[in-house]
Amino acid sequence: KNQVAVGVVCASKNYTYSSSEPTEIKIDNEKSESYWVGALSETLEKAVHRQMISDVEVGSFLSGGLDSALITAIASKYTKNKIKTFKS
Protein backbone atom coordinates (compact mmCIF):
# COMPACT_ATOMS: atom_id res chain seq x y z
CA LYS A 1 0.00 0.00 0.00
CA ASN A 2 1.12 3.53 -0.64
CA GLN A 3 -0.32 4.99 2.53
CA VAL A 4 1.56 6.34 5.52
CA ALA A 5 0.71 8.09 8.75
CA VAL A 6 2.83 11.16 9.44
CA GLY A 7 5.58 10.45 11.95
CA VAL A 8 8.84 8.58 12.34
CA VAL A 9 10.54 7.60 9.09
CA CYS A 10 11.40 3.95 8.57
CA ALA A 11 12.24 1.86 5.52
CA SER A 12 8.89 0.09 5.35
CA LYS A 13 7.02 3.40 5.02
CA ASN A 14 4.98 2.48 8.10
CA TYR A 15 5.09 5.65 10.13
CA THR A 16 3.57 6.39 13.50
CA TYR A 17 2.49 9.72 14.91
CA SER A 18 1.22 10.21 18.43
CA SER A 19 -1.84 12.39 18.07
CA SER A 20 -5.47 12.40 19.04
CA GLU A 21 -6.28 12.29 15.34
CA PRO A 22 -3.79 10.28 13.25
CA THR A 23 -3.14 11.77 9.84
CA GLU A 24 -2.79 9.53 6.82
CA ILE A 25 -1.15 10.60 3.61
CA LYS A 26 -1.57 8.78 0.34
CA ILE A 27 1.77 8.67 -1.39
CA ASP A 28 1.50 10.04 -4.88
CA ASN A 29 4.47 8.79 -6.86
CA GLU A 30 3.75 11.52 -9.40
CA LYS A 31 4.89 14.19 -6.91
CA SER A 32 8.47 15.42 -7.09
CA GLU A 33 11.11 15.10 -4.40
CA SER A 34 10.95 18.88 -3.85
CA TYR A 35 7.20 18.58 -3.22
CA TRP A 36 7.78 15.97 -0.50
CA VAL A 37 10.63 18.00 1.03
CA GLY A 38 8.25 20.97 1.22
CA ALA A 39 5.46 18.87 2.69
CA LEU A 40 7.78 17.45 5.35
CA SER A 41 9.14 20.91 6.14
CA GLU A 42 5.65 22.34 6.52
CA THR A 43 4.54 19.46 8.75
CA LEU A 44 7.64 19.79 10.94
CA GLU A 45 7.19 23.57 11.24
CA LYS A 46 3.55 23.17 12.29
CA ALA A 47 4.38 20.44 14.82
CA VAL A 48 7.16 22.46 16.47
CA HIS A 49 5.06 25.64 16.48
CA ARG A 50 2.19 23.76 18.13
CA GLN A 51 4.53 22.56 20.89
CA MET A 52 5.75 26.11 21.58
CA ILE A 53 2.49 27.02 23.34
CA SER A 54 3.54 27.39 26.96
CA ASP A 55 2.97 29.55 30.01
CA VAL A 56 6.60 29.05 31.06
CA GLU A 57 9.93 29.48 29.34
CA VAL A 58 10.70 26.90 26.66
CA GLY A 59 13.95 24.94 26.65
CA SER A 60 15.47 22.27 24.45
CA PHE A 61 17.55 19.19 25.21
CA LEU A 62 20.30 18.76 22.61
CA SER A 63 21.42 15.18 22.15
CA GLY A 64 24.15 16.08 19.68
CA GLY A 65 22.15 14.82 16.72
CA LEU A 66 20.75 16.62 13.74
CA ASP A 67 17.11 16.15 14.77
CA SER A 68 17.36 17.97 18.12
CA ALA A 69 19.36 20.80 16.53
CA LEU A 70 16.80 21.14 13.73
CA ILE A 71 13.86 21.23 16.14
CA THR A 72 15.63 23.85 18.28
CA ALA A 73 16.39 25.97 15.20
CA ILE A 74 12.76 25.85 14.10
CA ALA A 75 11.54 26.60 17.63
CA SER A 76 13.77 29.68 17.80
CA LYS A 77 11.72 31.20 14.96
CA TYR A 78 8.64 31.20 17.19
CA THR A 79 9.98 32.97 20.26
CA LYS A 80 11.34 36.43 21.01
CA ASN A 81 13.70 35.02 23.65
CA LYS A 82 16.69 32.78 23.16
CA ILE A 83 15.87 29.14 23.78
CA LYS A 84 17.79 27.70 26.68
CA THR A 85 19.51 24.52 25.58
CA PHE A 86 20.76 21.61 27.65
CA LYS A 87 23.00 18.68 26.79
CA SER A 88 23.99 15.45 28.47
Image: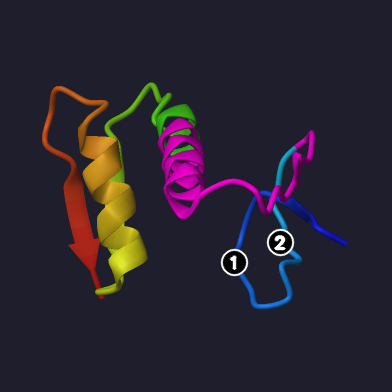
Give the residue displayed 47% in from the left and 54% down from the top. 33
**Between 54 and 22, which is closer to the camera in this rendering?**
22
Relative to 77, is 14 above or below?
below
Quarter of the image with the N terminus in it: bottom right
Give the residue displayed 51% in from the left and 38% down from the top. 43
Quarter of the image with the C terminus in it: bottom left
Give the residue type that dot 1 points to. Answer: Val
Q: Secondary structure at mark 1?
A: loop
Residue 25 horizontal/vertical position (percent)? 74, 43
Q: Secondary structure at mark 2?
A: loop
Residue under circle 2? 15
Q: Marks 2 and 1: in contact by CB < 8 Å?
A: yes
- Identity of the residue furthest to the right in this view: 1
Residue under circle 1? 9
Give the residue displayed 18% in from the left and 41% down from the top. 83
- The disc label shown at residue 72, or none: none
**Number of marks:** 2
Q: How is the image coloured?
A: rainbow
Separation of marks 1 and 2 at Cα, in angstroms: 6 Å
- Identity of the residue furthest to the front in this view: 30
For the residue carrying disc 1, how many other residues have a C-alpha within 10 Å: few (<14), some (14-19), or many (20+)?
few
Residue 60 horizontal/vertical position (percent)? 29, 51
Relative to 33, is 44 above or below?
above
Residue 29 horizontal/vertical position (percent)? 67, 54
- Magenta stretch in the rendered image: 20-46
**Between 14 and 71, which is closer to the camera in this rendering?**
14
Give yes or no for residue 10 being in the magenta stretch: no
Q: Quadrant of residue 77?
A: top left
Give the residue type that dot 2 points to. Answer: Tyr
Give yes or no for residue 44 being in the magenta stretch: yes
Residue 24 horizontal/vertical position (percent)? 78, 43
